[in-house]
Image: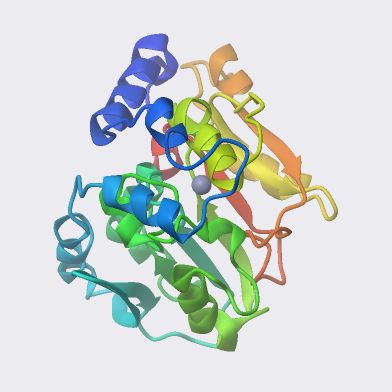
C-alpha cells in the first residue's frame, strides 16, 4: 500500500465509497417518529421499519461470492432469518480439515449492517488470504451477521434492535442469538476474535439521534473517533496484541517510518469490551478480541 493512501484525497475517496452505499435518511425523519421524550412502542417501530428500503442485495453481494470459497472452506448455513417477505440464510465459512490441535480464529463482519467494509473485508480476507493459514490455524468467518440491515444500510434489525447490544441469554435479536448458538460448542476455543466494524459519517448525524428518539431520551452530541482504530478491553488490556495489529495496518513511508497521518489515525480506544451485550470479548481465551473500525481497512491485507 503506497504512502499516498493516507492522503486527504484517499480519505475522501474512502468516505465517498461509503456515502455511495448509503442513502441517508435525515435526522428529522427519524425524530418525527413517535412523541419526543417517550420511548418507541410497537407502532413507532413498525412506522420506522416501513420507512426502511432495500438498497442493495445480500444475495448478490455475499451469497453469490461463496461459491469461489469452497476450496478452502466448508460453507455452512447456521440460521435463517424470516422477515416476511424476506428470508436470509445466515452463513459461516469453516476451514476445511478443521483440526482441534490447531489454534482457532473467529472473524465476524456485518454485526452492524451499515458498516459495509467489515462485510467485504471478511469476504476479501477469505478469498485472498485464508489459504495462507491452511494447516496453521482454524478459521471461522461469518461475513454478514445482520443481512436485513446490510440491505437497508442500517445499524438495527427490523425490530429497531441493535444486534451488538444483544449478545446475551434470551437475546431479543435473532441475528445475535443465531451467532451465539453457532459458537456455543466452540466457546473459549478461539485464540482470537476479530469483529470488524466501521465508523460511519452518519453515526452522529443520524444513528445516535435516532437512538435517542427510539429510547425517548434527549440527544446529546458525542464524538466518534475519526480514522482507523481498535477497541481494547480496559479490564484486560492487550497492548502488545493491539500494537501488532497497528504495526501491520499503519501505512509506512518509503523510508519505513509511519506517516504522521497514519500514526494519528491508527490507535486503540479502550472500553469495557464485551459488556452491554457486545459481540467482542465473548468467545475467546487468548488475546482479547477486538473491534476493528474504519473505512481504511485495506492495508490489513497488504
Ligand atoms: Zn459497528
Q: Determine the residue located farthest toward the right in the rendered image.
A: 235
Asked whether residue 200 appears in the rendered view, the answer is: no
- For the point 37% across and 48% down, the residue is 48
Q: Position of residue 3 (x, y in %)?
A: 42, 18
Residue 228: x, y in percent? Answer: 54, 31
Q: Does residue 159 sit above or below 267 in this rendering?
A: below
Q: Residue furthest front?
A: 35
Query: Which is more toward the observer, 23 or 200?
Result: 23
Quadrant of the rendered image containing residue 101: bottom right
Frontmost residue, 297 versus 17: 17
Query: Could you say which quadrant of the image residue 191 lies in?
Result: bottom right
Give the colour scheme shown: rainbow
Image quadrant for the N terminus? top left
- Vertically, is 160 above or below 208? below
Q: Quadrant of the C terminus?
A: top left
Residue at figure coordinates x 39%, y 61% from the top left: 146
Is residue 53 rendered to the left or right of residue 102?
Answer: left
At x 59%, y 49%, the residue is 39
- Looking at the picture, tell me which residue is in the foreground, 72 or 211: 211
Quarter of the image for residue 62 reads: bottom left
Left or right: 238, with 265 as reference point: right
**Residue 264 at least partly seen:** yes
Q: Position of residue 173 (x, y in %)?
A: 49, 68
Q: Position of residue 129 (x, y in %)?
A: 35, 56
- How many numbered marks, from 0 up? 0
Amino acid at each position: 500500500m503506497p504512502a499516498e493512501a493516507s492522503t486527504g484525497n484517499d480519505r475522501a475517496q474512502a468516505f465517498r465509497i461509503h456515502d455511495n452505499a448509503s442513502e441517508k435518511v435525515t435526522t428529522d425523519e427519524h425524530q418525527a417518529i413517535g412523541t419526543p421524550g417517550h420511548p418507541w412502542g410497537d407502532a413507532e417501530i413498525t412506522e420506522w421499519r416501513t420507512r426502511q428500503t432495500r438498497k442493495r442485495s445480500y444475495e448478490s453481494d455475499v451469497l453469490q461470492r461463496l461459491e469461489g470459497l469452497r476450496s478452502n472452506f466448508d460453507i455452512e448455513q447456521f440460521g435463517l432469518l424470516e422477515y416476511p417477505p424476506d428470508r436470509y440464510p445466515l452463513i459461516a465459512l469453516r476451514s476445511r480439515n478443521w483440526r482441534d490441535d490447531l489454534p482457532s480464529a473467529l472473524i465476524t463482519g456485518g454485526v452492524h449492517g451499515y458498516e459495509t467494509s467489515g462485510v467485504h473485508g471478511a469476504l476479501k480476507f477469505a478469498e485472498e488470504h485464508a489459504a495462507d493459514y491452511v494447516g496453521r490455524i482454524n478459521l471461522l468467518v461469518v461475513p454478514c451477521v445482520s443481512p436485513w440491515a446490510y440491505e437497508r444500510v442500517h445499524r438495527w434489525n427490523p425490530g429497531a434492535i441493535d444486534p451488538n447490544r444483544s449478545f446475551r441469554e434470551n437475546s431479543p435479536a435473532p441475528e445475535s442469538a443465531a451467532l451465539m448458538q453457532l459458537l456455543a460448542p466452540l466457546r473459549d476455543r478461539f485464540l482470537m476474535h476479530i469483529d470488524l466494524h466501521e465508523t460511519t459519517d452518519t453515526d452522529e448525524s443520524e444513528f445516535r439521534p435516532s437512538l435517542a428518539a427510539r429510547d425517548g431520551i434527549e440527544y446529546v452530541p458525542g464524538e466518534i473517533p475519526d480514522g482507523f482504530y481498535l477497541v481494547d478491553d480496559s479490564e484486560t488490556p492487550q497492548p502488545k496484541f493491539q500494537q501488532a495489529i497497528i504495526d501491520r495496518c499503519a501505512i509506512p513511508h518509503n523510508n519505513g517510518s509511519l506517516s504522521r497521518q497514519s500514526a494519528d489515525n491508527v490507535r486503540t480506544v479502550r472500553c469495557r469490551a464485551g459488556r452491554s451485550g457486545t459481540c467482542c470479548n465473548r468467545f475467546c481465551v487468548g488475546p482479547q478480541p477486538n473491534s476493528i473500525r474504519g473505512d481504511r481497512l485495506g492495508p490489513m491485507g497488504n
